[in-house]
Amino acid sequence: MGVKLPRTIDHEFDESLKELRLLATSAGAKVQNIVTQERKKIDAAYFIGKGKVSEIRDLAESERANVVIFDEELTPAQIRNLENRLDIKVIDRTTLILDIFVNRAKTNEAKAQVELAQLNHLLPRLTRQWTHLSKQYGGIGTKGPGETQLETDRRLINNKIKILKKKLKKIDNERITQRKNRLDLFRVCLVGYTNAGKSTLFNCLTKSGVTTENRLFSTLDSTTRKLSDSNGHKVLMTDTVGFINKLPHQLVASFKSTLDEVRLSSLLIHVVDFSHPHYLKRIANVNEVLSDIGADKIPMIMAFNKIDKSPEPYAEFGHYFTPDLKNFFLSAIKKEGVKHLIKRITYLADDNNSV
């Protein structure tokens, strides 16, 4: 379900819904239908109009759908009101992304980061999770007679959040120690929109075997390896989690230790899916996140990937790189243009050279 407001640009609205469909598919859903509505402003109670709610209810019954996914973040009240009217589960874009992250998390750190983000997202939404809020509970495990189940649940979640933050703080301290041992190294971080080909390029640059898949958020854990063919230079490459439009702020906060790898790097390589029709908008999305995490002042090289699939004549841009050596055009999967990028990285790794 997508809502188009007056200032929304047509192609950006369409692109966001296409991306939502990909996210839903990545989460294991089968998309039965896409519904849109143009509104002057958001409805406080239902996000959409009551007539559209009735339309969705009828459509869900005929399609035998069991969940409605909204492309924007909903308030707890809106979700509760919609579920009461539709009689099926309602989730928003943020919840969907968090669900995908849960399924993708492999390491203990990633699992803790995602769980923390989930709990922070869940906390203000507890009121809709329970049907027994009018009951009073007491005894073992609660703070005393008269505590409602909601208060108990809220307290338990806050305790769990404290435990997770403590765990992640310990991991963060370990990372700080590791970084101190790498002070003499030139640290390069790959950033970019999800599914831009960062992991494939990372494997090319480091001759590693990081898992690569043609799906959103295939990489959650940051991986660090030495740059191959570095000609004696000590260069460390780090592959990071991909960004996305409307990235939940809970994830940005929870992935602090991972994103510190970006903030503390010597050089960023912004990997762009050059074959995507709206790659310029995606560049802007990534730059916005980099600004949010305080990494917008770090020297950056643009790596326009997937030239083998791009309809644009990259040769007009100067073949594999532009004269200022800030924009490189390559195909990581076919290993085209990668050597030029490696040569530039090793040049910049010298103390006296700058982007």
Image (cartoon, helix red, strand yellow):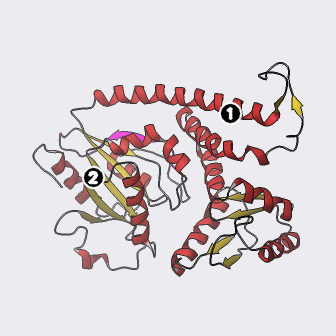
Is disc 1 placed on a helix, strand or loop?
helix
In the rendered image, the quadrant that contains the N terminus is bottom right
Position of residue 93 measured from the top left corner of the image (x, y, whole percent): 63, 59
Q: Which residues are magenta?
A: 216-233
Q: Where 258 falls versus 24 (above or below)?
A: above
Q: Which mark is residue 297?
A: 2
Point out the frontmost of discs 2 and 1.
1
Residue linked to disc 1: 157
Position of residue 166 measured from the top left corner of the image (x, y, whole percent): 53, 26
- Give, as a three-letter code, the residue at label 1: Ile
Q: Where 222 falls versus 277 (above or below)?
A: above
Q: Where 302 falls versus 138 (above or below)?
A: below
Residue 233 located left or right of residue 107: left
Q: Specify whether residue 217 is painted magenta.
A: yes
- In front here: 59 or 178? 59
Is disc 2 placed on a helix, strand or loop?
loop
Q: Sequence-wise, which precedes: disc 2 or disc 1?
A: 1
| Residue density around tag 2, few if under 14, some if 14–19, many if 20 or more, within 10 Å | few
